[in-house]
Image: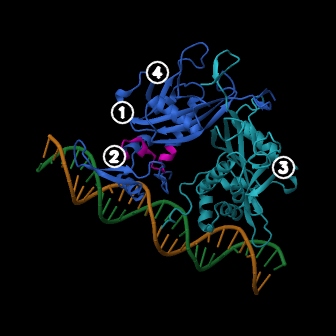
Chain colours: A blue, B cyan, C orange, D green
Amino acid sequence: MKKVSSALGRSIPERPLVTVDVAIFTVLEDQLQVLLVRRPEGATEPFPGRWALPGGFVDVARDATLIDCARRKLEEKTGVAASYLEQLGSWGGADRDPRGWSTTHAYFALIPAPDPKARGASESTWLAADEAAGKRLAFDHGLILAAALERLRGKVEYTSLPAFLLPEPFTLPELQRTYELVLGRPLDKSAFRKRMLDGEFLEQAGVVQGGYGRSAMGYRVRDRERPTVFPRTFRSGEAL
Amino acid sequence: MKKVSSALGRSIPERPLVTVDVAIFTVLEDQLQVLLVRRPEGATEPFPGRWALPGGFVDVARDATLIDCARRKLEEKTGVAASYLEQLGSWGGADRDPRGWSTTHAYFALIPAPDPKARGASESTWLAADEAAGKRLAFDHGLILAAALERLRGKVEYTSLPAFLLPEPFTLPELQRTYELVLGRPLDKSAFRKRMLDGEFLEQAGVVQGGYGRSAMGYRVRDRERPTVFPRTFRSGEAL
DNA sequence: ACAATAGTGTCTGTAAGACAGTATTGG
DNA sequence: CCAATACTGTCTTACAGACACTATTGT
């Protein structure tokens, strides 16, 4: 085993690179979108000019923990704090980065639609999630994005996650629309409303004027720290 | 940002330690048990003499990927391959290891009850999972074990995971017993059998003689690569 | 024959989906 | 008053849980 000598004079193995990447989702233009950044150009850079998930090296001087690091990356790129942030998993191996054996701790984040004029001048863009998943991304970020989408779509079947994609207060029809965008299929209005209101994770926040037609009740989530888990998935009896 | 110079002559940040730990579960003596190893003694060792999850540094020369590393640790400690291995998550921070900023990639594994006489002479032991979770383990392994138990118990509510804790072929009463041990509560026999057989993830493997009473049908899982996900959780309507 | 264990049938309650109905708003 | 949207009620169906029943084996 190849070893290097540590400051303490004991033998510590050679250390892999340690990075954090974040798949940041929002709903924009009636689409589920994900934030990508362009890798810097340059002969010494890995994957120059390719699209990648926002992320980078852990900074042992600034980041107390991995999730602090993820929060930092997120705020550097979007300027906002995530309304939802969870760990997706980690990937690591000898071949995923030409600079050496590397690991990444991947997170996935949900934020309400950002102010369109606040789009930073930096080399980043919001892209429809499925379109982004079709591109050849840097590193193994294609795999990571696919895993993030699968996790998001999976959890949307039985949790209140889409509530974190909307600015508050939101109406139940807006929330239903968000579920439908993520899942890619329509949901029954009556069943949807029953599930949301029986869950008791929403609180009323006054009536909201829509453009036309009857105005709707606005809602806020009661506990923004964790999503609600429903006892069943949508459309449980479809596969017959 | 503190940096060290790399072989390529470019500036690469200081690298955290990278380890892999595995929470290995089995059913032994009618209990859900987990494998712990004792940390080596010595003044320069972190947490000397404490119980810990099996694991250690990634070996960049031997391990092609993180999961390969997890498989290696598992086989070194148990002598067998896991029947189920999934990533649990990763933990990392400045304070979890006195040797410096460190990360661990945690996995959780299920194996059938090991041969009792094959218990290695090494400093390791099977312990009832809840008892182990009550101990003060090395590093943040208490947290990791708690997360593993929560994940296992959570998934057992709606997946076929317990099938990976049994040697094949097994009978439905044995499988039900395993579910009950993990969940810590009894399940209805009829509902249980309906769920298992309707799922079509088992195949018959000939009649098995029990000690007494009617003999039972033996089963094997059809696809040992992935567990079956049931559309609902057990006892969905309990909270009334 | 009896005890012990494996396996089945039947009833009931819950809750999701389908869908049609009512309510409230702006033009 | 009409169109558009928000919201509610009722019916049906699927299925998990409860529990009693039958089946098969060893002693």
Q: Quadrant of residue A96?
A: top right
**Residue at the spot of label 3:** B123
Camera-side mark, 3 or 4: 3
Q: Which mark is residue A29?
A: 1
First to last magenta residue range: A153-176
How far apart in space, not on screen, are marks 4 and 2 (Cα)?
Answer: 31 Å
Q: Chain of mark 2?
A: A
| Discs 3 and 4 share one subunit | no
**Residue at the spot of label 2:** A169
Identify which amino acid the numbered label 1 is placed on. Glu
How far apart in space, not on screen, are marks 3 and 2 (Cα)?
Answer: 57 Å
Identify which amino acid the numbered label 4 is placed on. Glu
How far apart in space, not on screen, are marks 1 and 3 (Cα)?
Answer: 59 Å
Secondary element at image label 2: loop
Label 3 CA crowd tier, 10 Å (few <14, some 14–19, many 20+) = some
Asked whether residue A130 is in view, the answer is no
- Which comes before the other along the chain, label 2 or label 1? 1
What residue is at 77 percent from the left and 28 percent from the top?
B61
Label 4 CA crowd tier, 10 Å (few <14, some 14–19, many 20+) = some
Identify which amino acid the numbered label 3 is placed on. Glu
Contact (Cβ within 8 Å) of mark 3 with mark 4: no
| Discs 4 and 2 share one subunit | yes
Contact (Cβ within 8 Å) of mark 4 with mark 2: no
